[in-house]
Every structure is written in C-alpha cells, then in structure tokens.
Image (cartoon, rainbow, N blue to C red):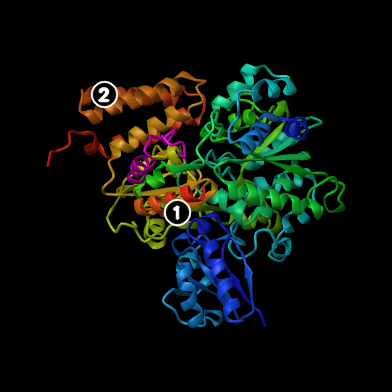
Amino acid sequence: MGPILDALGGLPGALLPILHAVQAKAGYVPAEAVPIIAERLNLSRAEVHGVISYYHHFRQHPAGKVVLQVCRAEACQAVGGEALAQHAIAQVGCDFHATSADGSVTLEPVYCLGQCACGPAVMINDDLYARVTPARLTSLLQEARSKA
Amino acid sequence: MSITVYVPRDSTAIALGAHAVAAAIVAEAAKRQIAITLVRNGSRGIFWLEPLVEVATDAGRIAYGPVQPEDVGSLFDADFLHGGAHALAQGLTEAIPFLKNQERLTFARVGITDPLSLDDYITHEGFAGLRQALTMTQEQIVQQVTESGLRGRGGAAFPTGIKWNTVRNTQSAQKYIVCNADEGDSGTFSDRMVMEDDPFMLIEGMTIAGLAVGADMGYIYVRSEYPHAIAALNEAVAIARAHHYLGADILQSGHAFDIDVRVGAGSYVCGEETALLESLEGKRGIVRAKPPLPAISGLFGQPTVINNVISLASVPIILARGAAFYRDYGMGRSRGTLPIQLAGNILRGGLVEKAFGVTLRDLLTTFGGGTASGRPIKAVQVGGPLGAYLPESLFDTPLDYEAFLALGGTLGHGGIVVFDDRTDMLKMARYAMEFCAVESCGKCTPCRIGSTRGKEALDKIIAGEDREQQIHLVRDLCDVMLNGSLCAMGGMTPFPVLSALNHFPQDFQAKEIK
C-alpha cells in the first residue's frame, strides 16, 4: 500500500486511481486496504467503501485465475450473444457474478467491449476475442485454464 | 528495397487475430529472406474485412482480408507483396466502395497512419489546427467552432461553441477540459477508434479547447473496458509531452496545457457528464442536479468544458480548414459529418463517416449490405441502449438530430445496431428496463424504481399475466421516467421501450403456440 499511496495519494481525485492500482496488484480491493486509503485521503471508511461497492469493476473478493467477461449488450445479443452467455454458464459451471466451484474461473457480464461490428465478444483476462462461437469459447477457456 | 506491410493494431483487428497474423507475416518473410517493414496502423474501420492486411505498392495500398495466420503462406506464394492476385485480395484499399463512398473528415487519417508515430501524424495534417489556433485570440477560436455548427457528438447535440464560450466568459484562476471517453453505448466504437487509432487528434483537440477557454489542465475519462485505448492514450500523451505538444510551454507559445488519463470503473451512468465529474473527483458516479452547469461549476467546482471524444476530435480539422469547410457538410441544424457505427447483425459492419442527411436505408443497404444472417431486418436501434427501435418503414429517415427527436428517438452517438426477424422486441424492451435498473445511479426515484417496476411488468407480460393492464402500467411508468428523471439514463430508457411497443405491438400479444 505504501508505494501506491505515495505515488498517487497527492493526485486530485485520487481515490479511483488508487483503487485501480490496488486491484491491479492484489487482484481485488481487500477490506484491510479501506481504512488505510481512508486515512491517507482524509475520508471516512464508509466513503471509501461506498465508492468500491458502487463501481462494477472493483472486486471485494479475489477472482479466479481466469476471468471470463461475456458481453451481454444489444449488439452482441443481435448475433447470438445470449446463446453464448448460456454456453458460458454451462461451461464454467456457475452463473454470472460468480466463480466456478474449483475457484479457477470467474464469470462476469460486461456491457460492451466496443467490438459491436464483430460480436459476440468476450474478454478472457486481458485478451479480447470477437465473433466468438460457443465451440470457440470452449477451446479458448480450455487454453486459458491450462495457462493459468 | 524493403516493402511496407500494414497490419492494424486496433482492438477489433486484434480480437480477430491481428497479432498472430502480424507474427506469421514477419516469420514467413524471414524464412523467405524478404525484407519487409511491418507497420501496425490503425483500422480503416472496414471491420468485416479485419484483419485487413495492406501492402504499399507504386499504385497505392492494396488490401487483403480477412487474413488468418494460415493464409499467410499462400499470400507470399501469390506475391502479395507486389499486389499479386489472391482469393483474399480486395484491390486498392481506397477503392473499396465501403470506404470510397464515405466523407472522412474526423477519420481522415484513421487506418492510414501508425497511431503512435508523431511523424505520421504531422505528415497527414496533424497539429495544423493547433498551429492555427496559436495565432488566434480565444474569442476567434471559439467563433470558429461556433460557426462550424459543431454539436456535441456524445448524444446531447449541444452546440460546442456555445459551451466553450460560457467557460471562456466565466472568470476563474483554474479551468478544466474534460474529455468524456466513457463510450458505454452498445453499438458504438468511434471514440475507441479515435483513441486507439489516432490519439494525437484527441490531444490536439483538447489542447485547442484549453487555449480557447483559458484552461491549462485536461482529463480524459476513459472506460476500464477499453484497455487498448487506455494504453494508446498513455503512450500518446507521453510522446506529445516529450515533444512539447503538451506541457508548460506548448510549441514555445507561452501557453501551458497538460493531460491526465483517468480510468473509469464499469459504470454506464458515468457517461452522463455530471456523474463523470463526480467519478473524476473520486466519488460514486452519482448524477448532479443542474444548474449549475459544468461550464460554470464543473470539475472540483471550477468552470469545465466537458465534451465527447468525437466532438473534441472534430476541432482540429475545423481550425485547420476553417469553419465554413466543415459547415458546408450536413443538413438543417446538423452540420458537418457524423462517424456512424454499423453494428450487430450486419453483413458489412464498421465505421462510416458521412455528412448528416444520409438515410438509414442507404447506410443499412449500400454500406451495410443487410444482415449478416441473410434474413430480413426487423428493427434497428439507433443511438445506444437509450435509443429507439425503428422498423423498416422509417428507414428513409435522414440522419439528422431533429429528425430523430421527432421520431421519439435520438441519434445519440451514431451507433446503429441491426436485428433480424428472429428478434423478440418484448425481450428487447425488457432488457432496456433491466439495463436501466442495473446501471441507474439511484439518485432519482423515476429511474431507480421505475426501471425495476418496468422490468417486473414486462416479465409479467412475457409470462402472459394481465397483459393489457401491464402494458398500460409500462406506458405509465415510461411517462413518469421520461418527464421526471434527473438525467438521460431514466429519461431516455422509455425510448427503446415505447418504440418497441408502438412499432412492434404484435410481439407484446399472446404468442401462438405452434
């Protein structure tokens, strides 16, 4: 926490940059970080917690080694996005906003990855894929699991 | 002599395998001992042909696409480096009808240059607008933007020059330029393309805005779902700073302007300008009541220009070529060009920049080629999740802000999502309410509760419970949301719902059991 707060604590509107840095490092924003950030920014713990819980992007618990984000917005729906989402649920073995029983894959919805001319789109960790069929998703997931 | 080969670095190209294609081309060239120069250019926006590989020849750039790594061997066999014939050959890139029939002003450079090459940028008219602005007074710059007729391209279509003038005339020691790059609308990717494929243009536009209103600091608020855009912006800002296009003394003019790139955190409503400002300040992205306008009291309570990426990116060419040049494009009160995004179930999807006035039909058929599935188009949604669903009978509507308002819709950010005849508009209406319920900031009741109740009512219609009464309830909720919401999130969610109800009433009736 020290280096992050030293580097970013002085920025105007520093809270989001700090939370991004913490999540980039730890994979989520641990509860222990909240009072430390609050003290540095002269905010209440409730204010910091309120910001973390407001934004879909910030996690309060660790995610699986593989994070699968499936676009559920209109443009992807128009080209089979819903079927792909259902396939993802079956493949991962859990619903959206959850992690598979073995803890390896976290499944999240995302509302637009900006690939709307070539949907359906998914993101697996930092890698983006367009025109994803259910079969392709199965093989991409397998590949990601074996790498993780 | 080394031959230049272009493989785009745009994220759509990457998502379709451009990195692997580039690697395969480099490896194959090495194997065959042919000297090539690989340039990772931006995308031409011809997404149906991505990854689109181009080769520089004496006749011009020749395109091949869509290329997959396994095609690379046969491309070399066909001597594609000299424009050889191949099944994937598309001829001269500039002659591809999808591109040739566009009017690219804002996207003039996009796809042609290496997005992070300052030399490329300058060779292609880059910073001409900034250099012009540096010779002008604040008033003259604002006047050029006002006379160009440019209106906010994020969707609200407020005249940009008037906004700038308000900030210019508000006295304060500190003013800000904020770029709204929280492009959350499904079916839109023009902001993303500018950021990934021509980021210096955005930097130039923001710098001109800073000169015009007397602001020395700018923020780009870009959504976390766009990692490639974030990376490109950060690199471009660092390059611009190193070459004194940003910093304490821009091009030895004595003017200071700098930019910080800030990342959103997955909240759709942060695309609303006051929620975005709250988020930039490090708070929950809750909408502010207006007034005060951000132009008077915006970021950290200071006068703030907040504009969409495309609005700011349109400024350099207006300054470089003059207001009249830009204003001569377009129709009615919609002047200039709009980068339109063809998305969803469309055969030829991608970016089409055209002057206002082009009809939906022209875009969907001449450019788009109909659906990708080959089935009839049932509806198109124009303007993102808050835009209306329009049936075929309205496809002769010209793209014009006022014409779309008259239809009970919005042109929004220029995204057009196509749906074929298998789409259930009742489900799309339900989705609109569900999306609003998920993304509502919660500050005003019509949006927060209205969307939740709306989703419930539509679920009952799907289940066939009290259909007529629930439809009445949905219409009533829409009326309250339209007239009582604090911002466009709740205020425009009724557009897709009501348009689905009005144009596709059969989808809300009992389904025949087949």
Three-letter amino acid code at the position of disc 1: Ala
Quadrant of the drawing holding the N terminus of chain B: bottom right
Question: In which quadrant of the rendered view does residue B3 lie?
Answer: bottom right
x, y percent for residue B392: 31, 50
Which residue is the extreme one toward the left? B514
Q: Which residue is mark 2?
A: B470
Q: Nearer the viewer, residue B208 or B63?
A: B63
x, y percent for residue A111: 46, 40
x, y percent for residue B188: 49, 47
Q: Is residue B334 magenta?
A: no
Residue B398 higher or lower than A23, as above or below: below
Residue B328 higher or lower than B216, as above or below: below
The stretch of residues the image draws in magenta is A82-105
Three-letter amino acid code at the position of disc 2: Gln
Instruction: Please tell me which residue is depicted at 73% across the width and 64% down the height of the picture.
Output: B119
Q: In the drawing, what numbered circle is on residue A130?
A: 1
Question: In which quadrant of the rendered view does residue B169 lie?
Answer: top right
Q: Residues within 10 Å of mark 2 (few under 14, many from 20)?
A: some
Q: Nearer the viewer, residue B354 or B341?
A: B341
